Amino acid sequence: MKKIEEDISQLLIDSQNKSEFFFDKSSGYFYSKEKEIKKVNAIYDFFITESSSDLITSKQEKFYEEIKFPNYDGLETFGDLLDKSSKTNHLASILDKNISYNSKALEVGCGTGQLSLFLRRYNRLICGVDLSIPSLKLAEDFRIRNSIDNVFFSKMNIFNLQFKKGVFDYVISNGVLHHTYNTEKAFCEILKPLKRDGYVIVGLYHKFGRIYTNVRQKLIKVFGEKLKFLDKRTIDKNISEEKRYAWLKDQYKNPHETSHTLKEVKSWFKKYNIEYITSIPFEEINLETNIFTSKNSNKQNSFFKELALMFSSSQIKEGGFFVIIGKKLV
């Protein structure tokens, strides 16, 4: 039986030495001209430190070694994950509906891998990369436990992805780029493995939608976690204690975050030859929507929709978040 590692080796490149990787079945290692990539805690470690000055990446790596987000909360089977994601993760369901059969998708910053695993249906090949070995280990354990053979998890640096240019039909990075030291540069990097005419899906904190969370962050920093009741999710007894703790840490104790506007990210799209298609929640999106068909949005209305995030109860609850989708032109 052909192993997924053999398919993945066709997508990889040793960026430092400009040589291809090969997979050796007998040893279970990936080899390039200069390197041998082994597993660390069952995860292939392709991580390359970009520079010694990149302290934010190091801090985030350490942070997510402790906070594995999201956790699996009793999810044992793929059916459990499918049921949970279908009910609670609107974006996951929309992506699953729209991403083509037999396609290749890369999730950058996959965390514990739940979205990557959810999208594994319809003969897709899914790669999930992250900087946290403990998070990836949860994903890999679930993959093995459920005999999923078309999802591959590995440790990589978002600023030094070890993939060839133009090999994925879709690149997804949801809630990740705003935790890097340079959000725009991270966006530019994740475009490199994307094919021409491929689609990029990016989720970011919104400058207006994040205002209430930013206020709570300052209050909790000054007065401590006794004010955590200001965020109802941290005291919701219907959520496990582990998940409440992870939410509190991720939203209020994260080492670094930035927030952005739709106008700003659209300027990145223009700069890097990405055609803007749609954005959530600024466009009307449901399970019947083709999210990869261009929408003609009114610029003035878009601004007022962004401003309205300050008063959106769902945005206040979810921490102020938006998703933007585009198509790579060159």
Image (cartoon, rainbow, N blue to C red):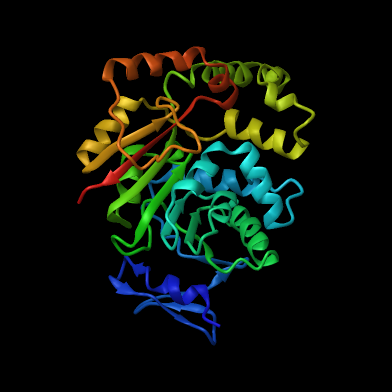
Expressed as whole percent of the image width and height from the top left, the position of residue 149 reads: 57, 69
Would residue 286 be found to the left or right of residue 141 on screen?
Answer: left
Q: What residue lies at 48% left-to-right and 45% top-to-bottom?
A: 95
Q: What residue lies at 42% left-to-right and 22% top-to-bottom?
A: 207
Nearest the eye: 242 or 181: 242
Nearest the eye: 187 or 87: 87
Q: How many marks?
A: 0
- Name which quarter of the figure residue 185 lies in: top left
User: Can residue 111 be seen in this snapshot?
Assistant: no
Residue farthest toward the bottom in the current orientation of the protein? 26
- Name which quarter of the figure residue 249 lies in: top right
User: Can residue 72 be seen in this snapshot?
Assistant: yes
Q: Quadrant of the N terminus?
A: bottom right
Expressed as whole percent of the image width and height from the top left, the position of residue 21 reads: 38, 75
Q: What residue lies at 43% left-to-right and 27% top-to-bottom?
A: 284
Above or below for 279 versus 40: above
Above or below for 26 versus 137: below
Above or below for 107 versus 218: below
Would residue 120 be found to the left or right of residue 329 on screen?
Answer: right
Above or below for 224 versus 246: above
Expressed as whole percent of the image width and height from the top left, the position of residue 102 reads: 43, 63
Expressed as whole percent of the image width and height from the top left, the position of residue 33 reads: 34, 79
Residue farthest toward the right in the current orientation of the protein? 237
Would residue 306 be found to the left or right of residue 327 on screen?
Answer: right
Nearest the eye: 97 or 317: 97
